[in-house]
Image: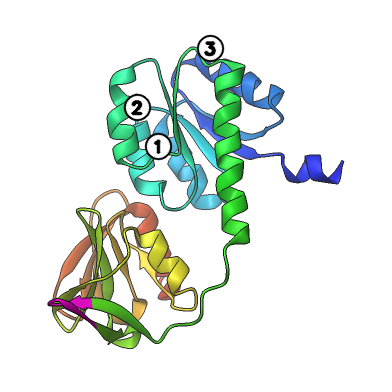
Amino acid sequence: MKEAEDSKLRVVIADDEPLALLRLSRCLEQSGCEVAAKFQDGQSLVAWLQDHPYPDALFVDVKMPGATGLEILAEFQDRLPVVLVTSGSEFAVPAFDFAATDFLLKPITTERLQKSLDRIRNLASGQKKAKPTPNLSKIPVVAGKGTVLLEVGKISHFELEDGLVWACASGSRFQTKWRSLAQVETALPKVTMVRLNRNVMVRPEAVRGLRVLHFGRRMILLSDGKEYAASRHGSQALEAVLGLD
C-alpha cells in the first residue's frame, strides 16, 4: 500500500474546452493520479503555480486564452514535467523543440496516457537516484581550444542561447559544458540564483537595480550594465530574495 501511495502522481491540468478538461481529469484519476487543480485558461494556471507548491506534472492544452500551452512549456520546462495536449499534430515538432515531457493527441486513450505517466515517474526516479554534486567554487569554461576554470563568485549570471549555456563575468561571456539552466542549478546547488526568464538566471549579488514594467514584470539592471526583462514569476522570485516583496 505504501508503494502505491508513493507512486501516485499529483498533477494540474488546463484546457479551455470544458468537456475535454472533464475527460482528461477522469482519465488521470482513473489512472491513479490526484488532480490537484483544473483551469480553463493559461493565465489562471500560471497564477496558481506562483502561490502553490509545484505538482508532479502539468497537462496543458496547446491553444488556450491567457497563456498558451507552448508559452507555459517555455516558462516551466526546466522546473517540472509538462505534457502538451492538443487535437492538432502540427504542434508536435515545436513541443519537442521546447523539450516537452510528452505530447498527447486528442482523444486521449488510457494506454497512451499511461505511457506519459510512466515517463514522468521515470524522470522523477532518475532525479532521486542522481548522485549529489560537490559544491564547486570554480567551473570549467571553453577558452580557445582548451579549458579554463572560472570562479563562481565572479559570475553575475548565466544565459541560455541556441542550446548552450554561457557564464557571464566582468562583461565577458564564457561557454560552459551545460545545455540547460536546470543543469546549472544541479551543478551549483549551494549557489543562490534566480531565473529572470526562460533564458537568463542571475546571482542576486549582481543586481544593481529594478525598473517596473507592465503586468507585474521588472527590468533588471546588472553590475555589468546589462538589462534583462524578467517574467512576472521571475520578478517576484527576485524581489523575494532581495527582501523587496
- Quarter location, residue 96: top left
Which residue type does callout 3 highlight?
Leu
Above or below — where is 88 with respect to 180? above
Residue at position x 36%, y 42% in the image: 99
Read off the residue under disc 2.
Answer: 65
**Residue 117 numbered mark, or none:** none
Q: In the picture provided, is 239 more to the left or to the right than 7?
A: left
> How did the renderer colour the structure?
rainbow
Q: Is there CB contact under 8 Å for labels 2 and 1?
A: yes
Above or below — where is 181 with respect to 22? below
Which secondary structure lies at badge 2? loop
Which residue type does callout 1 highlight?
Gln
Q: Is residue 95 magenta?
A: no
Read off the magenta span: 142-147
Q: Is there CB contact under 8 Å for labels 3 and 2?
A: no
What number of labels is visible?
3
Read off the residue under disc 1.
Answer: 43
**Residue 19 numbered mark, or none:** 3
Q: Assign the magenta stretch its main secondary structure.
A: strand
Mark 3 or 2, nearer chain start: 3
How dense is the environment of label 2, judged by Cα within 10 Å: few (below 14), some, or many (20 and up)?
Answer: some
